Image (cartoon, rainbow, N blue to C red):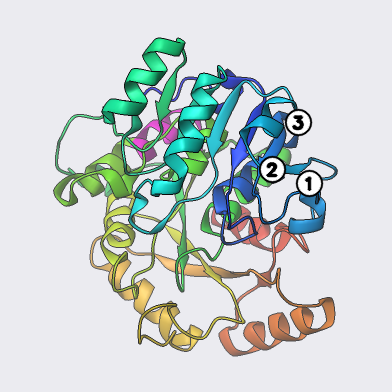
Amino acid sequence: MGDAAHGIDGFGRLAILAEGDFGVLTSKTAACVIRYAPERVACVIDSTKAGASVEDVLGFGGRIPVVAGIEEALACGPDALLIGIAPRGGALPDEWREILLEAIAGGLNVISGLHHVLAEDEEISRAAGAAGVRIWDVRVPKVPRAVASGSLRRKTGKVILTVGSDCRTGKMTVAFEVARDLGRRGVAAEFVPTGQTGIMLAGWGEAVDRVPGDFMSAVTEALTTEALERADVAVVEGQGALIHPAYSAVALGIMHGCCPDAMILCHQPTRTGIPGYDVAIPPLGDLIEMHEKVAGLVHPSRVIAVAVNTFDMDGDDAEREAARIEESTGLPVTDVIRWGCGRIVRVVEDLL
């Protein structure tokens, strides 16, 4: 669905814009593209970390350079500029406008996951037309407006959904890794992208948070149905969080649209509350019960595993916390990057 074509594969080598905020969580799109397609990345732009390598900043990614601006980026030979940060509300920061115009003048195509539609921005669109470069606004949906039919309640394949105790807990990464690992084990599985980074990597999907509320479930239903036409298991990327004051709507729309048979709860153990809001993250047992009850209003579902994001913990602390969560919830626990997703995949295989 949509016009994602071949995702970032259709844009050659990339300079990734992460100005002032390059990091594992602060530039999630940049980090995920570097993790899964490092061969596509020519450089990262962040003047505050210029001179470092991507490995120095993220702990992975190798010797990809971090540069100060467009002039240095162009010397690395990119074909496109990818915006690697999703600012609050998806707006275009004023200080980025000149960077984008310089990139366009330098002949770079532009890939944007912002809510701000660059193709509808008069100054940027005019500059792109004059330079003969493409703009891909990843978040703009290309689907008809419809309401969900509930057809997935009667599906034959299995649907797995990643849900979170908060935003930015690793829902996309877990879904991507689980689908890929199932495929390695001979299970026909499809990753279902519902956000801009997943679409960039997979080359299809829709950014559900851009869809009007009445149609979020329908778009998710259509994406999941499409995946199940090609596979026996659809692993759906969740968005937001049910307890998040700003982003609960998209989490619920995806949940009721895809009618999951099972859910994987994604959680960052060092996070105790929703940043910027006076909302505490409940005990995981309560979160698990809540997700199962809310999902069950439309289709029976259960949480089958907890995926912890321990990037900011040392190995011993991470292992102790995983063991504690496993004991308290009775569920398998893993960090899919640190320890792999074998424990989750074995539970999914049991569902089949």
Q: In the displayed structure, does residue 279 sit left or right of residue 312?
A: left
Q: Quadrant of the N terminus?
A: top left
- The type of residue carrying mark 1 is Gly
Q: In the rendered view, would you say 46 is above or below 283?
A: above
Q: Amino acid at mark 2?
A: Ile
Q: How many marks?
A: 3
> Is 157 on the left or on the right of 8, as rendered?
left
The percent coordinates of residue 171 (x first, y second) are 52, 58
Q: Where 76 sits versus 338, above or below?
A: above
Secondary structure, mark 2, is helix
**N-terminal of the two: label 3 or label 2?**
2
The magenta stretch spans residue 229:
yes
Along the viewing direction, whichever of 293 and 281 lies nearer the viewer? 281
Mark 1, secondary structure of its residue: loop
Q: Residues within 10 Å of mark 2 (few under 14, many from 20)?
A: many
Q: Position of residue 182 (x, y in %)?
A: 65, 45
Question: Which residue is labeled 1 in the image?
Answer: 61
**Residue of label 3:** 39
**Which quadrant of the view contains residue 295?**
bottom left
Start and end of the magenta stretch? 223-232
Does residue 346 appear in this view?
A: yes
- Note whether residue 233 is visible: no
> Which comes before the other along the chain, label 1 or label 2?
2
